Amino acid sequence: KGPSSSSSDVDLVDTSGHIKLSDSQKVKLGTGDDLQLYHDGSHSRITNSTGYIILNNDTGVLFKNAADDTNYLVCDSNGIITQPLKPAFCARGASSWTNVGTNNSGHIPVLATEVFDRNSDYDTSTYKFTAPVNGIYYFGLNIYWKLGTQGDSNNGYWFSYLTVANTEQSHAHTLQGYNNQGDADTVSSFSAMHHCDTGNEVYWKLKTPNQSEADLSYYGAHTAFFGYLVG
């Protein structure tokens, strides 16, 4: 029995032996009630006012869903923390060259083969990633490319734009043609961090100015778009 309330005792243990407390009634531990556990009617709360909350476990710690069949966060016995559902993806193209030509409106790289896509956030038909939650994301593009009509005496250039919610956010200016490079194949890497709102579509665009020297092509199998949620 618990303390008297409204001239009647309160049962703390039910017939099955479970401790029962109503909403906002607290389990208080410590001389100064330093640790308190309770449910406020909407959320379950653990409140600690002194020192750390310490979990001692030699085999690891799991945070799981209510059905106990999905891990949200895993800390193993070596202290390595993983988040199995954290958004992450990588996609590449086909074993062929794609010609962009002179395109100043923007070409989205055709990257339809998923290397991995943890939560199915990448669309292999539009070549775009959709942010599932608000947060800071890291994105990258590795591209194997060449400027097909460029001569040794000319300089060709093109741009890569990280595009978020159909707005060009950042870009890199890539040059080729100086020092007699000619039309040799080249590998370039671009990366950017950006805040995304839930539902924002993210993709790279390739632009070439309207000049005959910038006949851009890329080889899909050696080109990849990738990214993940930082936090």
Image (spheres, rainbow, N blue to C red):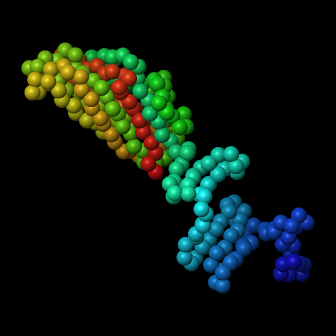
Q: How many marks?
A: 0
Between 77 and 185, the one nearer to me in the picture:
77
Between 231 and 167, the one nearer to me in the picture:
231
Quadrant where the N terminus lies?
bottom right
Residue farthest along the bottom direction in this orientation? 31
Q: Is residue 50 left or right of residue 1?
A: left
The image position of residue 125, as x and y in percent, is: 48, 23
Q: Is residue 95 left or right of residue 130?
A: left
Q: Residue at x 18, y 29 (%)?
A: 175
The image quarter in which residue 173 lies: top left
The image position of residue 210, as x and y in percent, is: 21, 20
Residue 128 shows in the view:
no
Q: Is residue 174 above or below residue 139?
A: above
Q: Residue at x 40, y 23 (%)?
A: 93
Q: Residue at x 11, y 19 (%)?
A: 152
Q: Is residue 30 above or below residue 221?
A: below
Q: Residue at x 72, y 73 (%)?
A: 26
The image position of residue 209, as x and y in percent, is: 22, 23
The image quarter in which residue 176 lies: top left
Between 166 and 88, the one nearer to me in the picture:
88
Between 63 and 37, the one nearer to me in the picture:
63
